[in-house]
Image: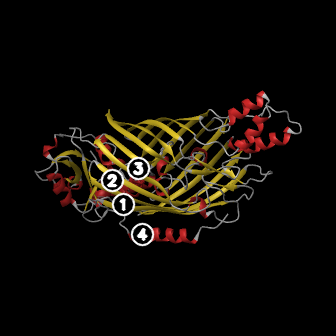
Amino acid sequence: MNGLSTRFLILLLIGLWFSSVALAEISLGDQTFSLRGFGTLGGPYNFDGQAGFIRNNSQPEGARGDGVGWDIDSRLGLQLDWKPREDFSGALQLVSRYRYDGSFTPDVTLAFLKYAFDPDLEMRVGRIGIDFNFQADSRDAGYTYLWVRPPVEYFGQSFMSHGDGFDLTATHELGEGILQGKLYAGQASETVPTAAGNEYELDGSALVGGYLQYQRLNWQFRIGYRVFQLENETPADPLLTLVQDTGVPDAIAFAQKARIAGKRFNLFDIGVAYDQGPLQSQLFIKRFSSESITFPDYISGFWSVGYRIGSWTPYLVYSRIKSEQDSYATGLPDIPPFDALNARVIQALSPYQFDQQTFSLGVRHDFARNADFKLQLDFIRNDRLPSALWTDSDPDWDGRATVLSATLDFVF
Amino acid sequence: MRRSKPGQCLPRGTGGGSPVWAWIRLVGLLGWLFSAGLPAETCDLVVIVNPQSGVEQLTKAEVINIFLGRQKKLPSGKAALAVDLNSANAEKQQFYAQLVSKELAEINSYWARLIFSGQGSPPRQAEATDEVLDIVENNIGAIGYVKSAQVNPRVKVVYTLGH
């Protein structure tokens, strides 16, 4: 993989310098405008050189044992907040990170106006972060969570980070706690790389969802549901057309089941977080169901626990994803001239069947009030290859990998 | 390791139940028993509101919900204007240690998550206690915290930390 680009490294160092000279804490004060930022410098070293380790499937190339994968975790974000009134505000956020085209071209990740009809009822319109998964809308800001990166099995295959639309958030006091509900609707606008090395445009794909969460003292419970409908056809579509054009009824049915344009995909998640003084723990599970066999149904989850001792917080994470298995029978006999086509279809579709688990242990050191250092060791076992959670895996890879990561996170 | 400086309160509850902190607490208790220092009440932090806010008292959960941005209204229905102290003030560390057993770095991380997901902004940061008192005295929905000895008749105490 290419090294971290020089321009991006300079930007990161400027951000780091800002963080050291900025106030020791982020504060809004009374300013109408405020400029803040976040960043991470660091990355994984993959002891196994037979597959590329990626943080999520928006990254086209992974770290494969030829040095530290600086691209994987390093990022820099800048955010301008505008708050002319208590009930009206806006935000613009740019994030530079390793993206689908291999560059660090900044993306606009937030650009919204927020209006509070009442302190308990707010609406945002514009480009908003999608918290399809628990706190996924802040996954680029490493300083905001315990780990080096969000667990790959839970967050790694979620390719939508933001959407253009609106959300409506209502809060209500219930007992000693706060019940919060959110509804959102919008369109995706991102591009992601595919396992086959192509790019897939999410533009125009519709998403609708919502969640309910209840926070009471140290506990937080959450349940969420969302559905999205993809607009564009899979890059494997020409292959599916070949299958369909054979005229074999089973092959025609297979091609229709494998297409993704216009198909709906559902995600249901449930979880609980406990945060009591130095102890913090989270357990989240989600179920993905799909109308297309290209992205088979799966269940994924993670459990994390950390305990702060002074400024050090050692932690453990276990995360897992498992898809329902599918043989991808095209309906065509596996004999010439169809066998080659069958093999190509299987090659194109099988990376989206997952069976992977990771056990991680690490430590976060809050050495300053606006910066931390993290060290994390991941033991990964992948029982289903090839996998879209890796890049360019060798055919003889056993699916086992050990990854050591070190990052420096800061906010300013 | 944190030590109590002259005239400064040692935050209670910091460090949760770890053995190290248990020893620190024991040493602190012995120090208090054999010292002729200020009475503990002087160091107590109290949560204050404007007397016109319609709030008589708050529970710990309500104070947590307001200062962590989960609840944006006072129980009386007024829009809450939470006033924090900036980190130069020792009271801030004591406040979050006693309220949620958290270090300031953790509170900073908590707010960073809400800020960078565009979901919220932290309480207004006052330079010093005098500014907290001034804001609370002049805003019906304002809520802040000060040492109990600094309370004046123009604000109302609705919660005492550590009790």
> Disc 3 versus disc 4: distance between alpha carbons?
33 Å
Chain of the residue on which disc 1 is drawn: A
Question: Label 2 belongs to which residue?
Answer: B122
Q: Residue at x 69, y 33 (%)?
A: A256
Q: Please state which of the two labelled residues, at mark 3 or mark 1, is closer to the viewer.
A: 1
Element at label 4: helix
Answer with left or right where residue B152 lies relative to residue B113: left
Element at label 2: loop
Question: Residue B29: percent from the left, percent from the top?
Answer: 32, 54
Circle nearer the N terminus (3, 2): 3
Q: Is residue A179 visible?
A: yes
> Disc 1 versus disc 2: distance between alpha carbons?
8 Å
Q: On residue A18, which mark appears?
A: 4
Asked whether disc 3 touches disc 2, contact meaning CB atoms under 8 Å apart, the reply is: no
Question: Residue A390: percent from the left, percent from the top?
Answer: 68, 51
Q: Residues within 10 Å of mark 3 (few under 14, many from 20)?
A: many
Question: Label 3 belongs to which residue?
Answer: B16
Q: Please state which of the two labelled residues, at mark 3 or mark 2, is closer to the viewer.
A: 2
The amino acid type found where label 3 is placed reads Gly
Q: On residue A26, which mark appears?
A: 1
